[in-house]
Amino acid sequence: MLLRAHQVARVYGDHTIFRQLDLEVGAGDRLALIGANGSGKTTLLRLLAGLETPDAGQVTRQGRVSLLRQHTEGADQTVLETVTPPALLTAEAGFTRASNALSEGHTDAATLTTFADAEERYRLAGGYDFAARAAAVLAGLALFPEANAAQLSGGQLRRVMLARLLLSPADVYLLDEPTNHLDEDGARWLEDWILASDAAFVLASHDRAFLDRAATRVAELERGTLSVYPGNYSAALALKETLKEAQERDYAAYERKRAALQEERGRLASKSGTEENRRRARDNDKFLSSFKAGRNQRVYANRARAMQRQIERLDEQAVSKPRTDRRTVRLDLPPVPPGPAEVLTVRALGVERGGKEVLSGVNLHVRRGDRIALTGPNGGGKSTLLAALLGELPHAGHAGEVQWGAGLTRYVAGQHGEELVGFGTVGEALLAANPALTPHQLWEVAAQVGLPGPAFSLVALSGGGRTRLSLARLSVTRAQVMILDEPTNHLDLPTILALEALLLAFSGTVLLASHDRALLGKVATRVWEVGGGQVREAQGTVYP
């Protein structure tokens, strides 16, 4: 085994993250690590990497283990310099010195030995094929080798750190949300890279399409315990549901049998009591009556005790009571007025930014009930298109006509939570989406998505909390059109599934820019491919 966690526990203060956790990762394993936000996935990865120490139990490692962290910082150097592993730089410097010594004519045994050792270290560090590997990885992640890492956006820098990890030889790669900030092409490239690798992987991710293609096993952290299922994400989910249904059936059968035994024990105990009363009663043959009643009383009492022991044995062998999933998020939409049948018409739309043509000659038509996915590469113009449709771009450099249906109301959620700017509390943000909400409803809606109460300050909300607040606002709005830019950012799987169900239940129109292929595959009825200055209607939905 390359990695083994045995009876591991991690505790912060009085909060137990997980306990008695067992996990093994062998050669060639591709293990998906799933669970709700806050369940301990990142903590477990850090324990496996040796960056934290368990409070109980033991983690053992064999071979090289590399961890991709969620948060990174850029240095003032090129992308290529940033992704070059320090071990390779050290090995290359030693190899260069040893090569120079040979070229200067030093051929003694010590020099030859030094050269052989340096060459071996350089080879093991991947020096001979590094240039080719780096070119392939950077191209796959849409990165430019000579770009300054310090000037990159957070999403670009995240891809740089992923490239650096993939270019560092390891036996086990621990990847924490590796598809964050990857477009569809980047995610598919990463899947192919993982499938072609001989290394083992632990993949903490909320990307269902990625886990379906890349994972061979699934480990779920839930309520401080870890359950491992064979297969990819969909197979594991199906197996979990099957096991849950079987557990519910077994527990129901146990309850029925226990109730029957308990009823019979009660009946026997009651008869025993009746016979005891008879034994004490007076009649013409007091001795004989007392003897018979005492004998019957003992028989019934013994049977009742035997029945109680049978109940106790049944309890010892019973399956655990199925637990209600408190993490499940359920959102109910208010009634939405239908609005006009013709929702949006776009004619000859063009947008220039910084002298560069971003969109040109775009013609679009949207009807009531359409759920349209906006797809395309990072920087292809999806967010620009949405901004143009909403009239948020300056008039200069903006051509064409955008016409919305008369009387339509729209709900807009940006990928960075721009719609929350100006609100002080959770309650203020919810009331702005639906002023009719009562104080009780404010508490209820906040609780449905795992948010604190209405008085909680937005400044104190995490990125995930702000995204869940946007989702809560989405669930209470009576808008007829929803315009969503990367709504799954920072969401865990239960909340993504709630968003999916909400959009499927929505009777209005949806424009959705997202890299979540599983979400788009379930929700979209039409697909716009945005890139190269154009918006092309795909034939059917491109996501199975």
Image: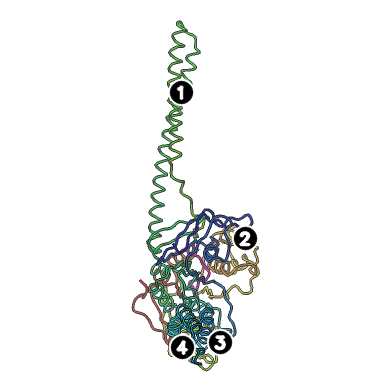
Q: Which residue is mark 1?
A: 301
Q: Residue at x 46, y 28 (%)?
A: 266
Q: How many marks?
A: 4
Residue 264 image point, x, y percent: 42, 29
Is 294 located above or below residue 81 in the figure? Answer: above
**Residue 530 visible in the displayed image:** no
Relative depth, front residue between 69 and 392: 69
Q: Residue at x 45, y 56 (%)?
A: 227
Magenta extent = 479-494
Q: Nearer the viewer, mark 4 or mark 3?
A: 3
- Sort mark 4 into few (<14), some (14-19) or many (20+) by Cα contacts within 10 Å: many
- Which amino acid, by three-letter code, is at mark 4? Leu
CA gap, disc 1 to disc 4? 88 Å
Is 222 located above or below residue 118 in the figure? Answer: above
Q: Quadrant of the C terminus?
A: bottom left
First in residue order: circle 4 vs circle 3: 3
- Sort mark 2 into few (<14), some (14-19) or many (20+) by Cα contacts within 10 Å: some
- Which amino acid, by three-letter code, is at mark 1? Ala
Q: Quadrant of the N terminus?
A: bottom left
Residue 538 circle label: none
First in residue order: circle 2 vs circle 3: 3
Magenta stretch holds residue 399: no
Q: Residue at x 43, y 18 (%)?
A: 296
Q: Which residue is mark 3?
A: 148
Q: Which residue is mark 4?
A: 359
